[in-house]
Every structure is written in C-alpha cells, then in structure tokens.
Image (cartoon, grey):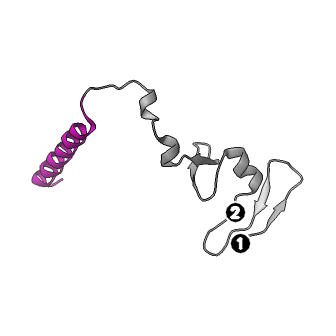
Amino acid sequence: MSTSEQSNESEKEVVAVTKHGQATIPKRFREKLGIEAPGKVLFRETDEGAVIVEQVRSPSEMRGFAAHSEATTDEPATAILRDKREQDRDDRESEFATGE
C-alpha cells in the first residue's frame, strides 16, 4: 500500500500517503502503541499543535471497564438517558418557541 523511508533518528519514519489519504503505521510504532490490525487509532491535536496517535481499545477490551469504578448514582442508565432526552427535547422546544 505504501512504502516507507527510515531516517537516521530512531523515533521518526517517513510514510507515503495514498491518494485516498491512507498511510501504513510502521510495525514498530504499532507494537509500541499496542495497535492491532484490524483496529482503530485516535488522532488528537494538542494545544501546542502536535498531533498524537493513540490506540483505541476494542469493545471487548473495554468489557467490564466501568465495573472497576464506583458508581456515582443508583439510578439505572436507561432512566438517566430518558431524563436527558426529555431535557434536550424541552430545551429544543423552548428554543424554537423563543425564536433563538
């Protein structure tokens, strides 16, 4: 898919980008970041303008993640979502009524 050229510095590598915007993450960086193929990565820009690439965990890796932390409410998630949807609907209706 793409070819890469390794620079003299150990933490840099030039990677070709296809006309479709695709690039291959070099194997050593995938291994360092724990990225498995197929998978997903997150590109994030810092306030200083640097672009960070992070591993996105699969749903199976996240299974049980919330169980490891203390719950902040005894209210079921469905009730919280229902209340939030009602509040959002009320906000939209009042926004349209005032013409904002």
Label total for image: 2
Residue 23 at x, y percent in the picture:
67, 65
Residue 25 x %, y %: 70, 58
Q: Which label number is shown at residue 24?
A: 2
Residue at the extreme left of the image, as rendered: 97
On the picture, is 71 further left or further right than 80?
A: right
Figure check: 10 above or below 26: above
Task: Tell me if residue 34 is in the magenta stretch.
Answer: no
Q: Secondary structure at mark 1?
A: loop
Helix, strand or loop at mark 2? loop
Could you classify mark 2 by the number of other residues whose Cα lies within 10 Å: few (under 14), some (14-19), or many (20 or more)? some
Range drawn in magenta: 75-100
Q: Earlier in the sequence, mark 2 or mark 1?
A: 1
> Which residue is pictured at 14% across the width and 55% down the height?
96
Residue that numbered label 1 is attached to: 1
Query: What's the magenta bit mostly, secondary-structure-wise?
Result: helix
Q: Quadrant of residue 67?
A: top left
Marks 2 and 1 in Cβ contact (< 8 Å): yes
Percent coordinates x, y for residue 59 in the rendering: 48, 47
Q: Amino acid at mark 1?
A: Met
Residue pictured at 42% horizontal, 33% vertical:
66
Disc 2 residue type? Thr
Q: Determine crowd level at label 1: few under 14, some 14-19, many 20+ residues with C-alpha closer than 10 A.
A: few
Q: Is residue 86 above or below residue 24?
A: above
Q: In this view of the protein, which residue sits in the foreground, 9 or 28?
A: 28
Real-space Cα separation, disc 2 to disc 1, in angstroms: 7 Å
